[in-house]
Amino acid sequence: MTLQRSLIARHPIVSASLVLVLGLGLAACGGKKEDKKGATQSAARVNKEELTVHQINHVLGQQRGLKPDQAEAAGKQVLERLIDQELALQKAAEQKLDRDQRVLTQLEAARREIIARAYFDKVGEGAPKPSAEEVKRYYDENPALFSQRRIYQLQELAIDAEPNLVPVLHQRLKAAKGIGDFVEYLKTNNIQFAGNQAVRAAEQLPLNNLGTFAKMKDGETTFTQTAKGALVVFLAGSRSQPVDETKAQPAIEQFLHNERKRKLIADDLKGIRASADIKYLGKYAEGAPSASPLAPAPTPAEVAASAAKSLDESAIKSGFGLKDAPAPGARSAAPIAEPVAPSASSVDAATLQRGLGLKK
């Protein structure tokens, strides 16, 4: 395959991620050059172009958490995507889209990103893995994530309000007979708000707020001032779902190891920036930074404090034993106020069923 055909892999007509751009597009370059000995590795022929098992395996290798018994079915799906991509490549080449300046620019950006990433990956290979003692210490220092882990059923109200109205809303929430009563107050006074309901595991909450949630009892409410008004979070219910140290160990090891890689990369980049001759030109010369814009490497305490944000979906599912966990998405990382104690009628079935009055 020529370089021009590879360029099409980044064009908008092929809806694919960067992995597919380089994984599927550039890997397709091996099709024409395969000799007869490699013919048995062919998976399909699209007009005159060969698609190979190697290309399929390359894409499958990018899939996290793919089980062996899923590989065959996943491979068939990947092959169909490769066929679609190959057809698009061929038609795009006929239309000379590979010479489009936008495509050339996008491919160059992808090339730079991948080569730079390869360098940083190589730097990160020097990061030592955490010891068993470090894993245990991290587990013991974060009970809300592990030994005392809970699943929270949350109902949120994002309220639009002027700053002078926020204290009034806070006092009204404290005086309310329940969250339903507070919602009725907002409706009666034509105060705009948006409601949302979600089930969040401890590791899916902003860690700087996890301590507050861990102390909350079912039926309690938090109130936080935001840039647009206020955020009310009502804990409709929760259940305990602890994770023992053995089960949590892989996720903790992965997190701590990744943090060490990140620190090595940040320190290396800081060093090569310091030794490089960097001059800002044109309009970028004005107000140019005098030092590297990189944030300083975190302290051990800060590393521990970023755990919930850094545990990715695969680590959560495999390390914590969760399946089909809802994606993280708490809107606000602002400090949450101390919970408002529930009144006798704060958790009633009708309110929960209506979803804060948002459903009939």
Image: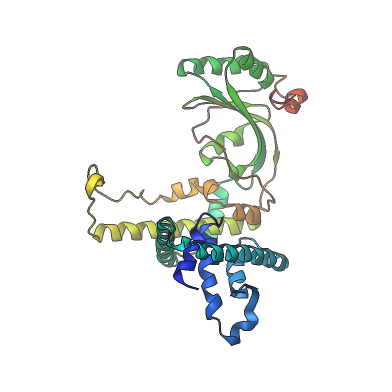
Residue 158 in sight here: yes
The residue nearer to you, when weighing 262 against 60, is 60
> Visible in this render: residue 131?
no
Q: Position of residue 244 (x, y in %)?
A: 66, 52
Q: How is the image coloured?
A: rainbow
Residue at 49% of width from left, 25% of height from top? Answer: 228
Q: Is residue 198 left or right of residue 301?
A: right
Q: Is residue 174 above or below residue 40?
A: above
Considering only vertical position in the picture, is 32 above or below 246?
A: below
Q: Is residue 238 above or below residue 270?
A: above
Rendered residue at 55%/46% (across/down)? 308
Position in image of residue 68 (x %, y %): 70, 68
Specify the farthest residue to the front. Answer: 95
- 76 with respect to 194 (left or right): right
Screen quadrant of the C terminus: top right
Q: Which of these two is toward me, 35 or 137?
A: 35
